[in-house]
Image (cartoon, grey):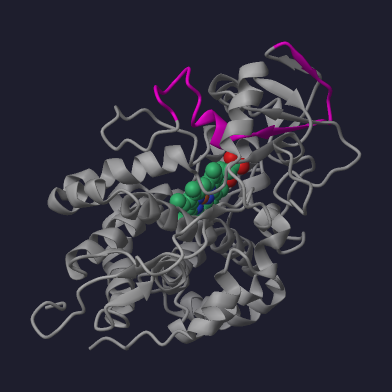
Amino acid sequence: MTTPVTLDRDRVRELFDLRGAYLAQVGGGYHGDPYPAWHRLRAEAPLHPGTVHELTGYDGPAHFQGLPYPDRPHFSAFSYAACDEAYRNAEVFAASPTPIDPRTGELAAQNSMLSMGGPQHRRYRALVQPSFVPGKAQWWIRNWIEQTVHLLIDSFAAEGRAELNVDFCAAIPVLTITGSFGVSVERALDIRAALRDPQAIVEILAPVVAARRAHPQDDLISVLVEAEMTDEDGVAHHLSDAEIYSFAVLLLTAGSGTTWKQMGITLTALLQRPEVLTAVREDRDLLRPAIEEALRWTPTDPMFSRYVTRDTDLHDVHLPEGSVLHLCIGAANRDPARWDRPDEFDITRKLRPSFAFGGGAHVCLGMHVARAEMRVGIGALLDRLPGLRLDPDAAPPRFIGLYERGATEIPVVFHAATEGNGRE
Ligand code: HEM
């Protein structure tokens, strides 16, 4: 028997509303469409001095990975080719300006493999990579994604209307990751809230880590406690608690907000194009290209940064050692040199890899989990909510935010489930 999901919706809203204070600092106050400015900038030159938000004309708070470093020179790349070149050259374009040590440093996503380089990054990444390969997607779906998705739909299927952005899209990734940590649904939101105070995460995870060290189970914390890492000096050791917490904070930070907003972007794109939604409903094989096209068309995080380790030239621009290069992957994903009609959301276009999941050594570890969450989530909505469409009486969804983009709200109506059209 499954336990009903009892999530406090008001608390979910407070933690996940893109317009809330939590996200204001990453450019949540930006309500415009950045793509015209990015097209103009890319047409002028592939690289410009300045940050993406300055160049886009936004002067509100816009903190993100790579910002702020007011004393360093900043440059931003807007073409696919320039981003590609930087992603491929991790020696010159490093993920962190300083060395990283998750065993001793502060507990934060930045103090994890996200910011490491070379062999150190490879060693840490190799420990978790086997749990995130395409062949493991079913493990995630079966253990956590499928039941989360259906229990959430159960909570509104009889009502005939729902707000999918927060009540559905936001909840899936956070419950998937906390579920994989062995944390209960009741405590899942405490974990999300604790991202403001990572020490609180330790308090929630410490008993789980101790329990898994004693009795490993079929979950991610067990993978981490059992993992053995060989240091540079050839000595093998198990991960310390601090290293496990650092992985956990990284996965929570990197995997929950992103997938939530990307699923909302994909759903919005489909709901705003009823003929495309119908095509996907009738031929579920179209769901994959729809997800990939949404990732290209509007990646939720359109900018990541790299640190220049020695004087170099990139596309005729001199980048001094110590400067910061912002890769505007949102602009790169609509580069007309790579995609025809780049502003169009077209699920029939020939698939070419985009930078929505980044590139090079740090390419998103969780991309197959994210894809599985979006596929299972949207597929289940189409299976279980006949007549699903945007609520004609509510304000339509809009995309807002600069460094974390997502939909405001996704109000929908559908034929309410009665006995017989619910889940078997
Ligand atoms: C649609 C959802 C997602 C998007 C758009 C996304 C995007 C990205 C991007 C662009 C990067 C590279 C950052 C850089 O170049 O500095 C990245 C890295 C990463 N992502 Fe994701 N991500 C998503 C979902 C997830 C999920 C579900 C997880 C985990 C469960 C995850 C875990 C990670 C990790 C651990 C890294 C760092 C990898 C490394 O440093 O080697 N992501 N992600």
Query: Could you tell me if residue 189 is visible in this image?
Result: yes
Q: Residue furthest top?
A: 316
Q: Is residue 184 magenta?
A: no
Q: Does the magenta stretch include residue 334?
A: yes
Residue 293 location (% of width, % of height) = 36, 39
Task: Please give left or right for residue 228 compared with residue 245 in the image.
Answer: left
Query: Could you tell me if residue 125 is visible in this image?
Result: no
Q: Quadrant of residue 29?
A: bottom right
Q: Residue at x 44, y 28 (%)?
A: 342
Residue 89 location (% of width, % of height) = 62, 24
Q: In which quarter of the image is the N terminus?
A: bottom left
Q: Which residue is drawn at 16% across and 77% down?
A: 423
Q: Residue at x 62, y 65 (%)?
A: 19
Q: How many labels does the image show?
A: 0
Q: In which quarter of the image is the C terminus?
A: bottom left
Q: Note whether 206 is above or below 165 in the view shown.
A: below
Q: Note whether 346 is above or below 283 in the view shown.
A: above
Q: In which quarter of the image is residue 33?
A: top right
Q: Residue furthest right?
A: 71
Q: Which of 116 and 324 is in front in this view?
A: 324
Residue 166 location (% of width, % of height) = 47, 70
Q: Residue at x 63, y 62 (%)?
A: 246
Write the start and end of the magenta stretch as one range: 316-342
Task: Please give left or right for residue 182 compared with residue 146 in the image.
Answer: right
Q: Which residue lies furthest to the front in this view?
A: 393
Q: Which of 391 and 44 is in front in this view?
A: 391
Q: Quadrant of residue 331?
A: top right
Task: Please give left or right for residue 188 compared with residue 58 in the image.
Answer: left
Residue 408 location (% of width, % of height) = 52, 62
Q: Note whether 320 is above or below 153 in the view shown.
A: above
Q: Note whether 272 is above or below 422 in the view shown.
A: above
